[in-house]
Image (cartoon, coloured by chain):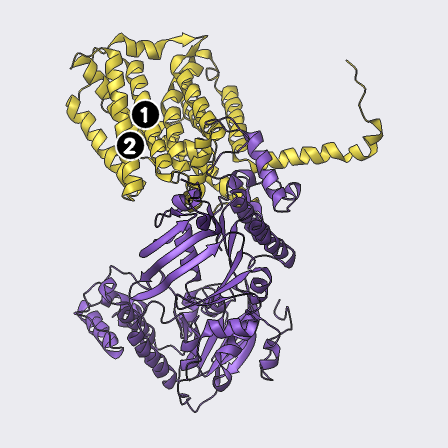
Amino acid sequence: MSEATSPRSRAVTARLRGVHKSYGPVRVLDLPELDLYAGEVVGVVGENGAGKSTMMGALAGSVHRDGGDIEIDGVHLASGSTEAAARLGIAMVSQEFPLVGQLSVAENLLLGRRPRQTRRHVLLDRAAVRAEAEAMLNDIGLDPRAIGVHREVRTLPVPTRQMIEIAKAWGREPKLLILDEPTSALGPVEAEMVLGLSRKVAERGGTVLFIGHRLDEVRAVSDRVLVLRNGQLVADLTPAEATEARLIREMVGGEISHGEPKPQAAEVEPYLELVGLTAAGLGPVDLEVNAGEIVGVAGLMGSGRSRLIHTVAGAQPATGGTMSAGGARYAPHNPGDAAAVGIAMIPEDRKEQALVLFASVQANVTVSILRQLSVHGLLWPRRQRDEAARITDSVHVRMRSVEQPIGSLSGGNQQRAIFGRAFATRPRLLLLDEPTRGVDVGAKAEIYELIDRAAADGMAVLVASSELEELQLICHRIAVMRRGQIAAILPHKDATKERIMTAAAGTGAAVDTTPPGYGASPTNGAGQ
Amino acid sequence: MSAQPVAPPETPTALPRPANHGMRVLRRLAESPEAGVVIACVVVFIVISLNAPTYASVGNLQVMGRDLSQTGILAIGEALVILTGGIDLSVGALAGLAGILAAWFNVNQGMPAPVAILITLLICAAVGTWHGTMVTRLNVPPFVITLVTYTTAQGLSLSITSGTPINGISPLFSNLSSYYIQQVPVPALFFFGAALVAWFALERTYIGRQIYAVGGNKEAARLAGIPVRRRITSTYIASALLAGVVGMLVIGRMNVADPSVGPGWELVAIAAAVVGGVSLFGGEGRIIGVAAGAILLEFIANGLLALHVSPYYQQVVQGLVLGIAILLDRVRASYFGRGRR
């Protein structure tokens, strides 16, 4: 089977034809034709949600593709089976490392297979496992003695775990090695090592799919750079063509015309003030949000967008700096403290973090105001139902009745119900994390309207989103984050996609675009 | 005989080494959850035997050995299931039912004892397969599906016998239970044998290491191509089979199949596993700890009898022991790294 049937199939490692995948109505991946050749490092770049992860998942079997055919060395790859993908020689290093913390480094490196140098099939050959694990670490340039192959993986720091994950994939001698932002958790030395390894795989005749968030790295390592946008392959560039400017242009696509600037409420008193705020993976951050103002938070995956929102909401402990809300010092220990001072958060994952899907609409929208609804601590069904009807009306939730399970509504309707619930607590500050994830285009517009309305009512709004168009459309100012800090704060009129992406990717020009007054806050450790 | 050290010049630098090494050993001991249980076993045994003269007598040790064959063997099967992140509440009731079934096949159906034993064990294996299948294919919580078996098995035991014990079972059963080898009762050997096999399977075979991987990080195991479902199901089968073995030993010991025996033992089995350092979240714990946990609980239970402690207080003491063991384990875990959560 593995015998090459024609000279062509030897040159092409992976042949993708008509591979596509949709989540609900959204087609997140659509690749009519793509060939990956042996002996090349293929860089893949794209904005968040451009389909990079889906493409890798389809190849590695962790994502079940809806249709299309993938051939590895001429052999058909079954859909959605990691075992099948592994058998055909595909290895993937994902961002969250699937390691077993309780097992030793050696056992993790050989997870699910036996060492090659053993004749035992049932009994564990510890010496062989150990020897092969050390060889694997040596192979990628790590000192096995420095790490200690007998140590439990959970006692190791994150960068080391990432390197172990890479060694694990490498040890399978893959034909196609998929690296998903492999350097995001690494320091410069290890990152350099990973780039070198990618080249080595290619020289050995393998193929590397290198998904990168840092454009300079991708350009340095790749023989060919693919750009994905909205699930489609928009550019297939040689290294010479792939300048940073070109890549950014391809990633963001044609600049869509800005929405008309929204009138900002006349009052400009700051409601939320952050000074030197730090938390795990965040900060120091200085930021002000005025009442009636919508401030966007942009940034790449892992730049601290969500962490900022969560820290302000009290869902993640702040480790330093000060926050004040409405002029008063504010130091939340949990989300309840945030709610008490009038801060409402709408989290990113509607199904996991915001709703009880099988419960009624009524129960879901009134859950945060039950105390106000109760009469001396007792709840009256009629009163609760009326209030639920009022809330859902105010945000135009389309449904049969408030008794209906909220899970049976469309994504947009669910999201509007969540907004209704947040508004019902009469918050002064609204925190939004990916407010339009998984809702269709029409529903998005309605949600933007709700956000505008909140600001018009005098709420301060802080909205983190991976969709730049969205931020450009609704925000008065956009704070761009990079590595846990604010790299730039751009007023609406200056916030072009190029400038946001440039600041987010951290290329040199970012500092120049920072308007005076809004610092990238280089004062490290301000709040420690 | 040559006592000459190989490298005398090393002595100046070698001086701090023993202390360092000693510290390392101490730390390793403190880090391993099993050490505490083993030490506790020794301390408890010494303290009680100093206060109760009959405690360390051969006769009493033999009694404890037989007791161990019951809860101890159950604890080993239970530990296997817990290692995968599951739990098996049915082991006690299933052991009871296995005894009843074996006796019923033997006495009421007139089957020879070996055939009765074989059929009963096959039924137990089927029950284990059923548990594993429900847990892995339909994602039924292990707690629920084994609770169903617990209730059903208990009910079946009572309905088969109409609540009265089955008499006149084949002498083979009591022979199994009443023989001694070098004064060690055969059932106790079953316990040590089961522990040895389980230890070997977990520590020295690929399948055993894969069970740890499944319990530690199911997703990682799946992505590494480990047959997660088969590994989980195999632990439920092992647990049910061991419960069957215990059932046979029990009716042999009493020479009668009593339908009221069995239910309740699963809690002792779970306690032994937890005291022995098995994490209820899965992926962590060793058989040596489980065996020591079972022995410790037996030492205490029997010791309280020997010390003439009121039966009412015996359960209180056992509960406290479990509480302290869990507390110490959490303290140790949080002290030596963020390990479990």
Chain coloured yellow here:
B
Task: Tell me if I can see residue B37 in this picture.
Answer: yes
Q: Is residue A332 above or below residue A167?
A: below
The amino acid pointed to by label 1 is Leu
- Quadrant of the image containing the C terminus of chain A: bottom right
The tag on residue B241 is: 1
Instruction: Return the residue at label 2.
Output: B129
Q: Is mark 2 on a helix, strand or loop?
A: helix
Depth order, front residue of B320/A363 = A363
The amino acid pointed to by label 2 is Thr
Q: Residue at x 43, y 8 (%)?
A: B181
Task: Tell me if I can see residue B318 in this picture.
Answer: no
List x then y, in percent, for residue B273. Answer: 42, 33
Q: In this view, does A136 lie above or below A519?
A: above
Depth order, front residue of A385/A379 = A385
List x then y, in percent, for residue B185. Answer: 40, 12
The tag on residue B2 is: none
- Quadrant of the image containing the N terminus of chain A: top left
C-alpha span from label 1 to label 2? 10 Å
